């Protein structure tokens, strides 16, 4: 039985999925340890949360500035963020081709980003509400997922693809966000103009995709039905989450009696895209100099 399962699963690793060859320690840390810590914090007594974890106007502390990004007071809020985190992790594990890149980014995400989210939220939203929740960090993971998908496509599918593709994804997300906020025709015109310019800059990528489409089709025909089903599910999920920013910035800022910190979501999302992109550019420059 185990051999049959192994024969069916191993071919998935022979494709480009899981190309980073994640270690067991990675799976344990991201899928067990981090969720376990979130559960422990969620189960803490309300008095401890109010004192150290929830960022409350007028009682701002160093503890709450950092820890407020890891705590929840309601079960639906907690479960929603935990589920989104696990989905983002799973997709990143599929598309990230360099585990060291995600490990390095995780240090910035877990240790630096909480301070930035709290500071930006207090500055932009003000002191009229309390702040708590893991959603800012989850948003950054979806931003990182976009970067990981770009690297994956560049490495295995489209050599002509460059960072303008990633910027095009960002612009398209911003265009969709305009549906959720009061917007003027000028804003639509400006973003659409940028999008068209970026699409024109992708002309070499479009030509390359047209040229290799038959190679991709022949490759898909050679792999088992189970793999094709898995690939289809993963890529459909990835396409969906490439355009998740409108869901992170909803039209209704009050949901289930709680304030949705869209500013924190914005901050996390753009942190997740531009920080790893910057690290990657610096790393490539250092590699070329050597």
Image (cartoon, grey):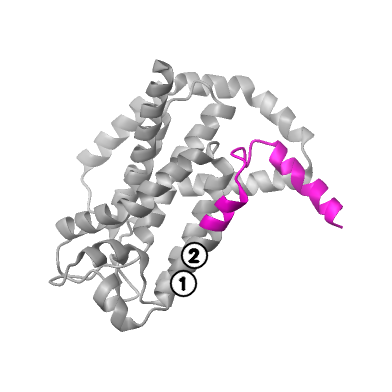
> Who is closer to the viewer here, 172 or 281?
281
| Residue 225, label in figure | none
Cα gap from disc 2 to disc 1, whole angstroms: 6 Å
Residue ranking furthest to the left? 58
Label 2 with label 1: CB-CB less than 8 Å: yes
Classify residue 256 by image quadrant.
Answer: bottom left
Left or right: residue 120 versus residue 273 is left
- Over which residues does the magenta segment extend? 1-29
Task: Identify the residue position indicated by label 1 in the image.
Answer: 39
Tell me: residue 64, above or below residue 15. Answer: below
Task: Identify the residue position indicated by label 2 in the image.
Answer: 35
Q: Is residue 280 magenta?
A: no
Q: Position of residue 15 (x, y in %)?
A: 69, 36
Q: Position of residue 237 (x, y in %)?
A: 55, 49
The dominant secondary structure in magenta is helix
Left or right: residue 135 versus residue 64 is right
- Element carrying mark 2: helix
């Amino acid at each position: 039985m185990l051999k049959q399962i192994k024969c069916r699963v191993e071919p998935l690793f022979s494709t480009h999925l899981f190309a980073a060859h994640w270690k067991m320690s990675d799976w344990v840390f991201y899928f067990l340890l981090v969720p376990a810590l979130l559960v422990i914090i969620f189960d803490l007594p309300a008095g401890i949360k109010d004192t150290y974890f929830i960022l409350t106007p007028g009682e701002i502390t160093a503890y709450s500035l950092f820890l407020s990004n890891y705590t929840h007071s309601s079960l639906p809020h907690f479960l929603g963020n935990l589920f989104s985190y696990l989905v983002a992790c799973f997709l990143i594990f599929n598309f990230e081709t360099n585990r060291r890149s995600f490990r390095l980014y995780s240090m910035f995400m877990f240790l630096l980003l909480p301070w930035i989210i709290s500071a930006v939220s207090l500055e932009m939203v003000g002191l009229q509400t309390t702040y708590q929740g893991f959603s800012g960090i989850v948003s950054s993971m979806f931003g990182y997922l976009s970067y990981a998908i770009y690297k994956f496509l560049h490495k295995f599918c489209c050599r002509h693809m460059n960072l303008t593709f990633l910027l095009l994804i960002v612009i398209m997300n911003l265009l969709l966000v305009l549906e959720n906020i009061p917007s003027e025709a000028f804003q639509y015109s400006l973003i659409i103009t940028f999008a068209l310019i970026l699409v024109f800059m992708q002309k070499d990528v479009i030509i390359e995709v047209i040229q290799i489409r038959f190679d991709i089709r022949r490759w898909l025909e050679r792999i088992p039905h189970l793999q094709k089903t898995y690939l289809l599910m993963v890529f459909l999920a990835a396409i969906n989450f490439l355009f998740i920013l409108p869901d992170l910035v909803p039209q209704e800022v009050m949901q289930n009696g709680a304030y949705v910190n869209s500013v924190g979501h914005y901050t996390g999302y753009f942190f997740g895209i531009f920080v790893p992109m910057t690290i990657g550019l610096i790393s490539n420059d250092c590699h070329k100099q050597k």
